[in-house]
Amino acid sequence: RVLRRYESFGAEANIDFLGEDVVSWMEAKEYFTQYLQVMKQYGGKKRPFHVAIKFSALHPFFSPENYKESRQAVGDCFAAFLRVARETNSFIAVDAELHARQAIVLDIFSDCIMRPEFRSVDTIKIAIHAYKKDAIATAKRLVALAKERGTPFWIRLVKGAYLETERALAEQKNWPSPVWDEKSQTDETFDEVLAYLMGNWGTVYVSPATHNPANILFAEHCAEEFRIADDPRFF
């Protein structure tokens, strides 16, 4: 009912199960099954059905310490999702994770979308956290991946959802903090990454997501400068 209401306004909604950090195989299987079921139930229409997934919801031992198994097991799940998404006109968004897991997320994403069977699939999105110090490096890696692949995908640029957790983990583990200390630094990084991605429009597409009026104005300015403000793929 809510989806139909948004559609009547000309808007689209992204369904997010808010799943992460499962602690059992049973719980991981439940998330896996729910992701598949929702695409089969609500996909298959002219307009794409949008669903966000968390890789950490698919494996109870998803961690860099268990890298090989995490990459294999979650990669198999993601491949299964991509097959159903292709059949049901569903749009999959891969959410960003905590910094310690993000390398695995990027590797799994890269592995799967470079497979011959998925290389032409363009209804895929992955998130970048602008509060991370390596955000621009991540953006450049994804643009290089899209160039090699030959088919664009979307990048959702967000500020980030784990700021205090990242700081606490870094302090606890005596690691360098992966996130910026000041909000102004995050805002500047958001604009830097946004401009870079818009400059590579067509190789990738970018969906900026922020409540900050200054960043919104900058996004609108960039869209005008790069002549993509009226492009329906800019959302």
Image (tube, rainbow, N blue to C red):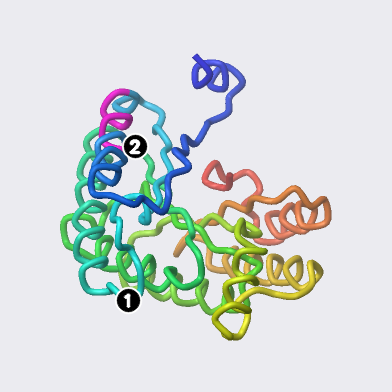
Q: Which residue is mark 1?
A: 65
User: Is residue 225 found left or right of 99 in the rendered image?
Assistant: right
The magenta region covers: 35-41
User: Is residue 227 found left or right of 104 in the rendered image?
Assistant: right
Question: CB atoms at circles 2 and 1 under 8 Å apart?
Answer: no
Residue 149: give x, y in percent of width and height. Answer: 30, 68
Quarter of the figure with residue 224:
bottom right
Residue 93: give x, y in percent of width and height. Answer: 43, 48
Q: Which SS type dominates the magenta stretch?
A: helix
Residue 134: give x, y in percent of width and height. Answer: 57, 78
Work out whether residue 106 or residue 235 is closer to the camera in this orientation and state it.
106
Q: Residue at x 63, y 70 (%)?
A: 168
Q: Which residue is mark 2?
A: 90
Q: Residue at x 77, y 57 (%)?
A: 215
Residue 36, magenta (yes or no) = yes
Q: What amino acid is labelled 1 in the image?
A: Glu
Q: What amino acid is labelled 2 in the image?
A: Ser
Q: Secondary structure at mark 1?
A: helix
Q: Residue at x 71, y 66 (%)?
A: 191
Quarter of the figure with residue 49:
top left
Q: Secondary structure at mark 2?
A: strand
How far separated are the C-alphas under marks 2 and 1? 32 Å
Circle 2 or circle 1, nearest the eye: 1
- Dot 1 crowding, Cα within 10 Å, few <14, some 14–19, many 20+: few
